[in-house]
Amino acid sequence: MSQAPRPGPRKLTINDIASEAGVSKKTVSRVINGEKYVNEETRAKVIEVMAALHFSPNPQARSLAARRSFLLGMVYPRVAASFSDFMPYVVGVQEGVLSYCRAKGYELVVHPCDYEHADVASEIDAFLKRAEPAGVVLLPPASEFTDVLDLLDRNGRKFVRISQQLDGHPSPGVGCDVRKATEAMTVHLIGLGHRRIAFVGGQTSFSQSEARRSGYRDALARYGIPVDDTLIVKGLWSFDSGKEQGHHLLAMNEPPTAIFASSDEMAAGVLMAAHERGIDVPGALSVAGFNDMPIATRVWPPLTTIRQPVYDFGRVAAEALIELIEDPVGTQPGVNRAVPFELISRASVGPVPRVGVTSA
Amino acid sequence: MSQAPRPGPRKLTINDIASEAGVSKKTVSRVINGEKYVNEETRAKVIEVMAALHFSPNPQARSLAARRSFLLGMVYPRVAASFSDFMPYVVGVQEGVLSYCRAKGYELVVHPCDYEHADVASEIDAFLKRAEPAGVVLLPPASEFTDVLDLLDRNGRKFVRISQQLDGHPSPGVGCDVRKATEAMTVHLIGLGHRRIAFVGGQTSFSQSEARRSGYRDALARYGIPVDDTLIVKGLWSFDSGKEQGHHLLAMNEPPTAIFASSDEMAAGVLMAAHERGIDVPGALSVAGFNDMPIATRVWPPLTTIRQPVYDFGRVAAEALIELIEDPVGTQPGVNRAVPFELISRASVGPVPRVGVTSA
DNA sequence: TTGAAAGCGCTAACAT
DNA sequence: ATGTTAGCGCTTTCAA
């Protein structure tokens, strides 16, 4: 019967390997940890015995004795139900982190958390106490909550932030320059002749919303285009809010010729609003998104957008974190690592329409 | 300076709590583990001291001494790059698992793995050896690979499968009856007058593809509709393959009036093919999907589909797994738990067109 | 380059 | 209801 509570052969320990290989347990330990000063023949013998017996050292015992954990933590928002545009971001980062930490012998403990309720900082702290990972990668929005960062700092936790605000805290940060990316997209639209460019931002509580908005403003300023505040609206990052704001903008007396939404999810919502109003995209309206999520190529027309290399975020963050853990003296704590973004041009953006015909 | 390698106050141990509370360390241990036979006053005192000192027991030491892990593992396919339709499934299950295992004091170690290369069974086995979780939740396709299940069994691992094939192995399984769900959707289409119903299945190597196909066949049989094999095609679960198969089907001399794709991703691809051919959905063609993923409501028209309660899969699987771990004698190993599916009716499916006009 | 002894922080087994 | 002792499987420290 499957999974019956049978005793099984007693689990192998380092002692079994030691006696089988004819060395002391300490020597086996040295081989396991790749230490220097082991005779190459001894090492080979030990490795051979371990392989033959399918031995694998007990990670908990190792952690206890060495006073170090072989676990890395990752903190991010719950994304299954709401907030789903963020899902590919989280998963991408997660796989990036794993690609590196596996190679370094760490496993990943995940901690999605609810940001609606309660005291997030102590919730995260409690997680760290329960799991005791060697370090933790923080994704937005936790990576941008000062009270979280300060608490972790006070408790001597090692962490790396993945954030749009690299210089938001004196701890290592990884991310793209979002302000610059937003500016690049806006310049792209201006280059196609657009002048009435609307901007659908996110909730102001997220600092990245602000970064995106200022990139938009800077680009307009650079080309001497006056900022029309009625063209700057706020969504909630969601599809529905994008649709709502799209309808709002397209119902204006003098509607924009281009709408730049600061997430693909919202851009898809804008697209839906245009469809519902019979407005041709990109003939009468250009729509741009942000993030290059899967949805960007699932809608019609596919979205021009900004790609953030989320997998790289994860890999680079894991790299920085493991450096911090394994070489706490050599590492500059506050060093940030910027990863380049990419403007992806697809069919949802085109030249400004010749005449002011934008609605049916 | 943030995250400097400072010594910090020596970490608290159970001994500190014991002396502070004026009891032995064993009593503290009893309180931590919620054991019976502790005087209520003593218990209260210990709890008070632990709270006051912000004490949290070292999980690694606990695991070592008690010879049990407080980690649960989760094995699933890598979904960031390819295969992205599966992402919400994985994330949903993950959050379901977490909702239950946190409540029970377990943390979750994740293991996305590549199924393209190598020996999956030993790859998973190596993960279990490195992390030594108390048990593991297997998602498809690992949950349907007999060699994986057999190896885990031989090694005395505790696991629960989330799978479409509940009776595919004598170990606990959680999932929906997919054959029945496919049948229900086909019957739904038949009820709307459709007779030429195409079916876009998945890769035959996945057993769930077969279950879905047979549900389709059964429904047709029940209504005395002959099976036209040219209407049964294979995709790769992906958007692109759905689009390709959609074009193929719609280019037929006598094209189907309804296309039932066995994933939303593929259904979205079919929709795209219809758009490209100027075929009105649902006026001239009905399109149904499977899974009720976010994309189902991001396309136009939104997809009629089958919802699988993935969060519940996760929660129920964690429940079953922890039962297996904590009460290995009382649990029936082979007990499966079916979770009900739901047919979600949206605008992509309508009555069969009056005349045979299906293309522009 | 190797080994012996001590102990990481906790729980099991057996007292009392 | 509580305490004592021994040890979980490994690494550290120090000696050889």
Image (cartoon, coloured by chain):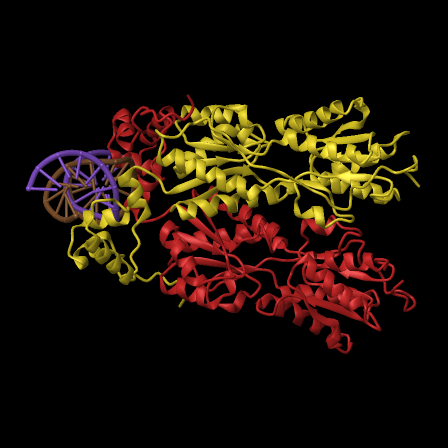
Chain colours: A yellow, B red, C brown, D purple
Residue B124 in which image quadrant: bottom left
Q: Quick check: A233 above or below A131?
A: above
Quadrant for residue A243, please give it. Answer: top right
Q: Nearer the viewer, residue B116 or B106?
A: B116
Position of residue B270 measured from the top left corner of the image (x, y, whole percent): 75, 60
Task: Indicate left or right for B65 with B237 as reference.
Answer: left
Looking at the image, can residue A166 be seen? yes
Query: Which quadrant does the C terminus of chain A fall into?
Result: top right
The residue located at (58%, 37%) in the rendering is A340
- Say left or right for B142 vs A213: left
Q: For this view, does A168 lie left or right of residue A125?
A: right
Towards the viewer: B104 or D2 = B104
Along the horizontal axis of the image, is B211 left or right of A47? Answer: right
Q: Position of residue A320 (x, y in %)?
A: 44, 36
Front one among A59 and B243: B243
Q: Residue at x 81, y 23 (%)?
A: A228
Q: Residue A15 placed where, x, y %?
A: 20, 53
Q: Is residue A199 above or below residue B161?
A: above
Residue B327 appears in the rendering: no
Identify the residue at image location x=47%, y=30%. Answer: A172
| Quadrant, the N terminus of chain A | bottom left
Residue A271, position as x, y percentages in the image? 79, 42
Q: Is residue B356 above or below residue A276?
A: below
